[in-house]
C-alpha cells in the first residue's frame, strides 16, 4: 500500500478548512513554518499544487478541492471508526435541512426526538436550496435529489400543493359566494374573485405555482386575477394567516394540531410538484447508530403524520 505522508494529511485538512496557514498552526498547536513544510511535502509527493497563494489570500486549486473532499471524508471515517472501537462513538449529528421543512415540521417535533433518544444531540444546518451532499456540509441530509450513488435515501414525502386561507377569509368566501362549506366545492370561476398569494421559489418564476395548479384543471391563470408575490412559502402562508388571500402550501407546512384554528384547506384539487423529499446518509456510515436512530425516527414521524405511506 502506497500512502502519502500521513502527518501532512491533518495539516492539509486544517489549512483547507480554515483557509489559513496561521489559523491551522494555532489549531494544531504547531508553528506556521511546520504547517508550510508539511504542505510542501504533500504537494511534492502528489506532484500537484494544492493552494493558490495571492499575496495574503489563500485558496484551493481545483486539484486541492478534489483532494480536500476525499481526505476530509477519510479522516472523519478514521476518527469515527476509532471512537466506535474505544466505545466513545459520538451522538452528535449535523442535519442539513430546508428552512421551511425545519421551521414548520421538524422543530415542533424535536421534543419527541429528545424524549425517545435523549443521548442524540442534533444540530440543524438550515439551507434555502437543495444541500450539497458532503461530510463537510453535514452528517446527514434532507434532500429532494438522489444525486450521489455514495449515499442511501429513505423516502419522507412526495410533495403536493393545495390552496388554503384563514378561517375569517373562508367565511368571507362562503358568505359572498353563498357556499355551504359542508357540501359545496369552490369553482375556479369563484376563486378568480379573490387575491392569490404566490411563492416565487417553487417554480422560479412569478405566479408559477398558481399557473401549474390551474394547468392541472386544463385552465390558464386568469390574466385579471390579482396575485401577490412572495419569495418563500413561509411568507405566503403568514400572509394567508392574516386574511390577505389564498396561498398554495403543502402537507408539512401545516400542523393539524397547531394550525387548525388558523387555516382552512379549500375544497379544490391538488398539484403534485414532482419534488420528493428523502433522508440521505453516506453508505460508508450506515453502521453508525446515531444516524440509524435519526433515520428510524424521521421515517416513523413521516408515516404517523401522513407524509408518506407506511
Image: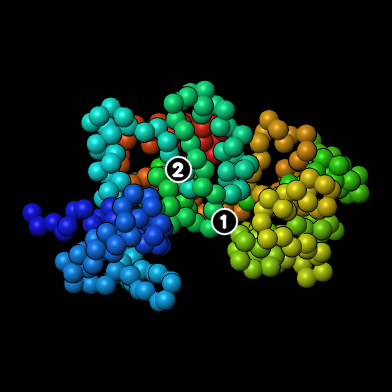
Instruction: Give the quarter of the image for residue 53.
Output: bottom left
Percent position of residue 213, x then y: 65, 58
Residue 310: x, y in percent? 46, 33
Task: Mark yes or no: residue 75 visible.
Answer: yes
Task: Give whichever of 274, 35 is nearer the camera.
Answer: 35
Residue at (72%, 36%) from the top-left corner? 259
**Crowd class of label 1 (few under 14; some 14 to 19; many from 20; radius 10 Å):** few
**Which image quadrant: the N terminus?**
bottom left
State whether residue 138 is above or below residue 196. Answer: above
CA separation in Å, label 1 and label 2? 16 Å
Judge whether 61 appears above or below 304 on screen: below
Q: Residue at x 77, y 58 (%)?
A: 196
Residue 167 x/y as whole percent: 82, 40
* Residue farthest along the left direction in this orientation: 1
**N-term-proximal mark, 1 vs 2:** 2
| Disc 2 crowd, CA 10 A, few/some/many (<14, 14-19, 20+) | some
Tag nearer the camera, 1 or 2: 2
* Percent x, y of residue 267: 73, 45
Say which residue appears at 47% left-offset and 55% top-offset: 131
Determine which residue is flagged by label 2.
94
Q: Is residue 105 above or below residue 19?
A: above
Q: Are marks 1 and 2 in contact (CB under 8 Å)?
A: no
Residue at point 67% right, 53% down?
A: 233
> Which residue is disc 1 drawn over?
128
Q: Residue furthest right?
A: 176
Secondary element under disc 2, as helix, strand or loop, is strand
Residue situated in front as seen by the camera: 198 or 183: 198
Amino acid at each position: 500500500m502506497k500512502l502519502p505522508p500521513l502527518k501532512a494529511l491533518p495539516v492539509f485538512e486544517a489549512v483547507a478548512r480554515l483557509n489559513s496557514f496561521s489559523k491551522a498552526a494555532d489549531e494544531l498547536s504547531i508553528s506556521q513554518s511546520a504547517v508550510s513544510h508539511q504542505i510542501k511535502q504533500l504537494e511534492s509527493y502528489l506532484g500537484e499544487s494544492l493552494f493558490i497563494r495571492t499575496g495574503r489570500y489563500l485558496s484551493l486549486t481545483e486539484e486541492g478541492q478534489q483532494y480536500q473532499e476525499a481526505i476530509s471524508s477519510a479522516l472523519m471515517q478514521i476518527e469515527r471508526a476509532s471512537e466506535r472501537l474505544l466505545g466513545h462513538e459520538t451522538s452528535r449529528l449535523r442535519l442539513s435541512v430546508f428552512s421551511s421543512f425545519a421551521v414548520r415540521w421538524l422543530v415542533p417535533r424535536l421534543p419527541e426526538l429528545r424524549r425517545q433518544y435523549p443521548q442524540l444531540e442534533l444540530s440543524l444546518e438550515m439551507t434555502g436550496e437543495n444541500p450539497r451532499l458532503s461530510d463537510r456540509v453535514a452528517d446527514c441530509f434532507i434532500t429532494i435529489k438522489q444525486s450521489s450513488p455514495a449515499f442511501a435515501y429513505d423516502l419522507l414525502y412526495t410533495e403536493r400543493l393545495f390552496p388554503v386561507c384563514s378561517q375569517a377569509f373562508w367565511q368571507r368566501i362562503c358568505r359572498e359566494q353563498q357556499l355551504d362549506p359542508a357540501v359545496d366545492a369552490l369553482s375556479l370561476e369563484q376563486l378568480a374573485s379573490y387575491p392569490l398569494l404566490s411563492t416565487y421559489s417553487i417554480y422560479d418564476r412569478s405566479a408559477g405555482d398558481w399557473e401549474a395548479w390551474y394547468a392541472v384543471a386544463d385552465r390558464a391563470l386568469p390574466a385579471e386575477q390579482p396575485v401577490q408575490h412572495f419569495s418563500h412559502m413561509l411568507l405566503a402562508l403568514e400572509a394567508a394567516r392574516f386574511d390577505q388571500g389564498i396561498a398554495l402550501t403543502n402537507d408539512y407546512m401545516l400542523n393539524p394540531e397547531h394550525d387548525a384554528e388558523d387555516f382552512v384547506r379549500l375544497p379544490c384539487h391538488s398539484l403534485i410538484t414532482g419534488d420528493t423529499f428523502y433522508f440521505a446518509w453516506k453508505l460508508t456510515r450506515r453502521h453508525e447508530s446515531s444516524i440509524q436512530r435519526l433515520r428510524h425516527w424521521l421515517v416513523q414521524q413521516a408515516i404517523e403524520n401522513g407524509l408518506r405511506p407506511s
